[in-house]
Amino acid sequence: MKKILFVSTALLTFLTACDDDYNDQFNIGSSITDVKNVNLVLQDADYGTIAGLPANKELALSKDPEGGTVSAALAQLGSQKYFTNLIPAEEYLPAYLASIYPMVDDGSKIAVTANVYKEPSGYLADFKNISTYQLTEDDYASVWGEKVKANFLSPSSVSKISTILKTVKADAADGDMVVVNYAYSQVEPSIGGGSTAEPTWTQIATIPARATGNDWNFTNMGPIDLSEYKGQTVNLGFKYTSTTSDAATWELKNFKVLSVPYLDVAIFAKQDDGSFKKLVKSSEFKGAGEYVIAARGADAQFYPFGRLAEGKTYGYMYPDAIAISNGVISAADAADFVITLTATDAGFTMKNAIGQYLYQSGNYDSFNVSETTGDKGYDWTVSSAGGADLFTVSNVETGKSIKLNYYKTSYSFGCYAASKLEGYTYVNSDDNFAEVAVDLGGLSNVWSYDSKYNYWKATAYVNNVRYATESFLVSPAIEIAEDAALPYATIDEAFRYDGAEALTVWVSTDYASSVARSRAMSRADVAANASVLYVCDEGEWSIYSNDDATVNVVDPSVYASLGSSTISTPETVIPAYLSLTYPYAADGDRVAVVYNKSVDKPVVEEYTFNGTWSATKDYEPTTINFTRENGVFVAQMSSYIDETFLGSEGGFTVQNVSLGGLNYVWQNSTSYGWKASAYYNSKNNPAESWLVSPAVDFKKATAPEMVFDEAHRYLNGAAPESYFGVKVSTDYKGDVTTCTWEDLKVEGWSDGSTWDFVTINVIDLSKYIGQTVYFAFWYKSDENAAPTWEVKNLKVREHVSEPAE
C-alpha cells in the first residue's frame, strides 16, 4: 500500500509541474455539458415514489396546511396511480425528475407520460338510487286479466311495465331508477277459442343466393319466388335448427315482399386478369373504373345491364342471362357488358361496351344512349342498397334508380322512381316478426332483435354451450294478389359456425288461422329471462336511454349461467358478455352496463371498446413536457384540445353564415362525432357553416401540432378543400366574417368512397407559438355538391420528441 501511495504522489507531482500541457492534451474545461432529451413513461411503482418524496409532501402541506386535504390526496397517489386536479402532474413531477436526473444541465427536455384523471361521462350522473323489482304473479295477472293465464310478458304487453311501477313504486322521486326483471316471450299466449292446430309449413326449395358462412358480410338472398301462392295469405318462416354439436348464428335484415320485381343491382369490378368479380359489400366500390352491372332474377340467374336492342337509341333493356361462376364473370363473357364509370362533379357518366353514354330524358322510365355526353340526364350515383351486396344506381337528374323488372314473362331493365314501387309493395319492414318455438332446448328464446344494429339474430350457442333447438322467426301476414306478376320475398342474411342446411326458409298458408304457440313457453310459470332499466319522471315511468352510450342491463340468464345472483368478477365476466352481445362493435363504442355487484344492489359501470371491451378508466395517459431552466424542471403545456366529439361538443360552437333554408348543417353524434351536410330533401342546398373552437393559448408552446380523424363522401369529383377544411385565426372576436382566417394545409384525406375514418397527417402549428388562436372547421355547399363531412378525435398537443440517440 505504501508503494502504491508513493507512486501516485510522484505522478501527481509530475502532473502539477506540467499542468498546462496536461490540460491541453485532455481538454479539461467547463465546456462539457449533460443535456438530455428523454421520453419517460411512469410505471405503477413510480406513483408511490412520487407521493413519498419529502419535497412533494412539503408542497402538498403548504397548499392546505390546516385541512390536510391535499396531503391526503398525495398519499392516495401511490394506490390510485393517477394524478388529479388536487395533485396535478405538472406540479409534483419536477421533484421526481430532479431525483432521477440530479446532474442534467439546463436545456434538457424530459417528456413524461403519466396517468391523469379525466372526468367521467356526464350521463353517468343520471344513475342514482337504483333498486330492483321482479314482476310477481299478481303483476302478470293485472296485465292479462281473466282471459289468459300467463306468467310472462309478450311484445303486445311489455309496455305495461310502466303501469305496474306506478302502483308498486308510488312513492318514487324524480330520477329514481328500477331494474325490472321479468319473464318474456316473443310468442303471444293463447286467449282461448279458435283452432288449436299447429300451422303447416312448406319449405321453399329454391333460394337464389345464400351467404358464404365464412364471414359476417350480408348477402341478399335474391327474389324468392312466391308465384304459386297468388290469391292466398301467407307467412314466411325462417327456421333455425341446432344440435348440441352444431349451433350457427344467423342474422337477417331488410325484409321485403313485392308483387312485381323491382330489383337492385350487383356490381362486378374488373380484376387484374380481365375478369369481373362481384363486390360483396358496399365499401368495396372504389368509384371510377370498369364494371359489369347485373341483377339477379327469381330464377337465380344474373341479367346484365347496359345494352339496348341493336339499332335502338332509346327504350328498355331485355338482356339474356350472363354466365357467372363463383361470383366471377370471365373476361370473354363480360366483354359485351362492360360499363365504364367516369367521375363528374355530380357523380359518374356511364359508357357501355360499344361506346354509348347512357342517360335519361324527360319523365320516361326508359334509357337513352348517345355517343357524346350532354347537359342533362347523364350523371349517375352509386350507393349502398341496405348494406348487403346490392347497390342502387340512380340518375341525378330524374332521381330514378335502375331496377330489374319482370314484364310479360321476361326480365328487363328500366329506371324507376321510388314511388313506383309503393303500389307493388306488400312488406318493407323488419317489424312485427314473432318467434314460434318448436323446441327451445331449455333456452328462453333463440331469436332476438338487435335494435343497435337493426337485425334479427338467432343463436343457440349461449355461455359456451350449444343447445338443441328448433324455432321459426315468422313474418307478418302477406296477402298476395291473384293478378300479381311475379310475387317475391327478399331478405339479407349473414351466418357463421354451421351450414345453410340448418337455416331454411318456409311458407305457411294457415299460420294466421292457427293458434301458434311455443311449446317451451306455454307452461304457467316462466322464470325471469329479461331485464330493463326504468326511470321515474314526475310520477311517470319510462325506459331509460341516453344519446351518449348504449345502456345494457345484464339479464337473469347471465347470472344463471354463473350460478350466482351477483357478478363478483366483472373485469372478466362483462367483457366476454359484451363481446357476444355486440359482435360488430367499433372502436370508441361505449356501453353503460347495469349489473348486480351485491344482492339486489345494481351498480353502473361504463365499458369502452378498443379492440376488446374493458371498463372505462378514471384516467388516461397524458404526455407532459418538462424543460430544465435555471436548475429546475418546468412543465410545458402538453395538450390543448383532446376531444373525441362522440356525443361531446368539446366546447366548439356552430356559427352559420348561410343555411339556404335548412335548419342546421352541423350536428353532433355519439357515433360519428361532428357531422356536416347540406344535402336534404334529395337536393344539394347552398350553405356555409363554421364550427369554432374555444380559445387556445400557445404562449408557452414549444412545438404545437394538430391531428384528427375524418371521413367524407359526395364531393362529386371535387377536391375536399373546395368544400371544407380547417382554418385558424388570431383575431377572432365572435364573428367569423369579420376577422382574418388562414387555411391550414390538410393532407392525408380519406378517399371519399366509404365511411371509413382515416387519421390526417399531423399539422405543424409552430407558426402560432406565443399567440392565442381559434380553430374552425369550415364547410360550404352549392348546387353541384353538398358533401357530408365527419370529424372526430381532435388533438391539439405538443409534439413529443423522439428519444435522443
Image (cartoon, grey):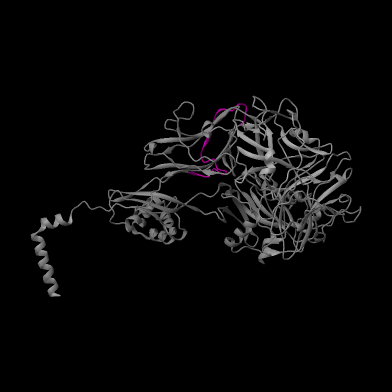
**Residue 77, x across and y down, in percent:** 43, 58
Left or right: 136, with 667 as reference point:
right
Q: 340 or 75: nearer the eye?
A: 340
Figure quadrant of residue 658: top right
Q: 464 or 251: nearer the eye?
A: 251
**Residue 467, x across and y down, in percent:** 73, 64
- Residue 65 seen in the figure: no
Q: Residue furthest left?
A: 17
Query: Compared with residue 737, is residue 168 higher up or lower down, i.e. above or below?
Result: below
Q: Residue at x 89, y 40 (%)?
A: 482
Does the magenta stretch mainly form a helix, a strand or a loop?
loop
Q: Which residues are magenta?
A: 642-664
Figure quadrant of residue 718: top right
Q: Residue furthest right?
A: 194
Q: Quadrant of the N terminus?
A: bottom left
Query: Compared with residue 314, is residue 241 higher up or lower down, i.e. above or below?
Result: below
Q: 357 or 733: nearer the eye?
A: 357
**Residue 293, x across and y down, in percent:** 69, 40
Q: Is residue 130 magenta?
A: no
Q: 433 or 482: nearer the eye?
A: 482
- Residue 326 seen in the figure: yes
Left or right: 183, with 610 as reference point:
right
